[in-house]
Image (cartoon, rainbow, N blue to C red):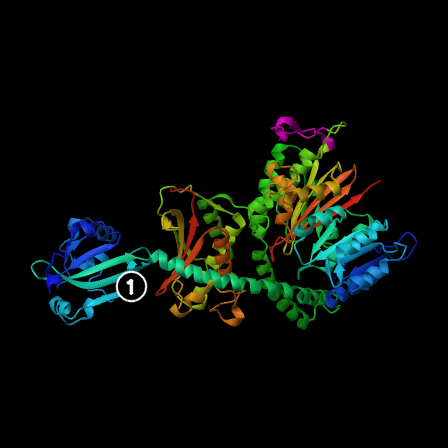
Amino acid sequence: MQENQSPVINKELYDGLPFSVVLIDDDYFIRELNPSAALLAGSNLEDLKGKKCYAALFQQEHPCRFCPRANQLFTLDELHSSGFRFRQEILAEKPETPIPRNLYYDQTQYLVRNSDGRAFLAETLRDITQDKEQEEEKARNEKLILLGTIVQMVAHELNNPLTGLSMTLQTMEDADEEKIIRMRRDIELAQGIVADIQGFTRREGYRLEPIPLATILNESIDVAKRLFSPVPEFQITWDIPDKHIQIEGNEKKILQLFGNLFKNSVEAWKSSRREKPLTIWVIVSQATRKTDMRSTRHYLDIQIVDDAGGIPQEVLHRIFDPFFTTKKLYNRGSGLGLFIVHKIMEEHAGTVDVQTRGEFSRFILHFPLKRKV
Amino acid sequence: MSKSLRPLFHPNGEKYHLALVEDAESILLAIRDFLVRDFRVSVFSDFPSASDYFSGENCDVDLLISDIALPGGSGFRLVEQIREKGCRTPVILITAYDINEYIETIKSLSIAHILTKHSNLSLQEIFVTAWKILSGDIFGIDKYFPKIKIYFPSELLGKTSPANGEVFSVTIRNTEERIFWTDRIGAYFKEVLKIPESVSKLVLDEMVTNGMLRAPRHADGTYKYQKWIPEKDMLIADDYIELDSEDYILLQYGFSGDWMILSVTDPHGTLEKEEILYRLRRHILPDKKTGLPEGLTDSHGRGIFLMRDQLTHLIYNVHKGKKTEVIGLFNTRHPIPYKNISVYEIHD
């Protein structure tokens, strides 16, 4: 008991912490907070005092669904006596148009008493979104490198028999017979898959040059408008001041990258049989990420968001796998579209993330920048 | 498939003799079946049997078509063997691997025809390659597309957009026309075949630059329309070029099905097989000291490397001292740069 009565609110100590610390009372009002918490809430420190924690930190109207304290029937005083202490990873959302963005926090809650003996809920929040994304990216990379190697070997081995088959068909006199045309169509399908694989495994001559992003985006959208029917509606938002920004890339590969993503949206929209027309949002913004303990790197984030029906959570981790598809067997493409997207980003020293929520899907392409815009 | 090329006979009145070496039986037999109507074809499915055949004194084969990776040895070893005997038999290599790995050997053995073994490789392409080598009749895109209709400048009547199966020909006489046509054709291919202008214009610019700037030379070998700056080892083109009438170039463009067709012909015939392979090699092979391709530090021959890098098939037809035709083919259904390259040379 002696320990509990000592002053626990040491301002110098928690003001210097690089993660958020908030003291909350029994009615969810914020009583104290450190500058990191104000930064997280995107507001002035003094203005946040006296606000409900769920409104100030997470823009909610009610206590957050993931809040451990909210699921307790006891007062803070009672919880303190019971030794309440909780730590978890939480998934929160940051409001963004057209859909909120996922943020991950390492959250702890425990009870403290001030010198008057009054109990407060101390909550710490550390933003671990980047760590989570990097962790997922690393696991995904390892899997995809292995799968890519296998796929490449298989394609090479299939090349000979397919070439033989295709050439033998070319020598057949009755080449117009329907059964032969059907066989040829199947061979072409298989050829397309092998060609796709060869296309991303042949890398020589692959030069990265500065490309004006706006130009290549517009060109990709023009191509999509010509190729896809019905035509999706595109909404482009620039969250950076400089619309003339250039990315280091290979023009053909970048066109293929956007093309594959747009095609993915259109096909998802078709297979979900939605009546509402398809909208694709393209949002360009800037972000800074840690590369290691000491350094950070600037990125250009390009989000491709669609309302084509969303992706089932249970398949989200397989979405970049080669030959993974949710489309119907007889309507599918090569099943390599998103695998190639991942591969192209890797070749541009960038990464890609995917999120889904309700009818929306969001792919975020992170392109490294030489300097801040 | 219609071959549409006239029957060919050896000067001795018999059919030409081809040796075909390939270990995949279905490919071997398909090529044989396709070629056997026009040529006498001997087939070998591994290195030892082909090597045995060539171990004799004579060079009685008019053309060797070989895979690179063979059971028991390599296609290169086979070519070395016949070259050691002094046979100048022309060779077509067909390989599933990237030829960049072999560029040094390809150059040293003077192999001018490399076809990538991919499942879209057409027998017609192999047949045309063989036919052109043996006949010496090398010019024209209609050899690859027998059904195509070619329109000459006087037949166009202001039209600039050929329909499927048509090829338009235009004459380029100066810088203004060069800019107009490269822009126009780039936009045309983007419209009809959805080919990025970066691809079609790169190829077109390179072909036209070659025809306008590199080919025309004075009697002493110096360039007519560009100057060499020795201290920078650079060639600077004149700002505005008005070609002399004997230097006009012919540009042809159009499409057939999935194929983009581009060709530029100049009336000089200055390019050489050795030089093309040499230029390609310096942009592929890393320099021992720097680890980077030698060609990175200057621009000599970069165009050949870049064009081949974009195309399904790049073809050079050269009549020494008379005419050079550069043909670029690009398949839009499988837009993979297969990088096939063929160099045909004829001399008077």
Quick check: can you spot residue A85? yes
Query: Is B301 in front, or is B282?
Result: B282
Percent of width and height locating residue A133: 38, 58
In the rendered image, which residue does mark 1 sit on? A90
Residue in the picture at 79% in, 60% down: B20
Residue at 62% x, 48% y is B309
Question: In screen coordinates, is B284 left or right of A309?
Answer: right
Q: Which residues are magenta?
A: B222-246
Residue B152 visible: no
Circle 1: residue type: Ile
The residue drawn where x is 48% and y is 69% is A327
Q: On what subunit does the disc labeled 1 rest?
A: A
Q: Residue furthest left?
A: A116
Q: Secondary structure at mark 1?
A: strand
Residue A208 percent coordinates (x, y): 52, 46
Q: Is residue A223 left or right of residue A283?
A: right
Image position of B173 with respect to A348: above or below: above
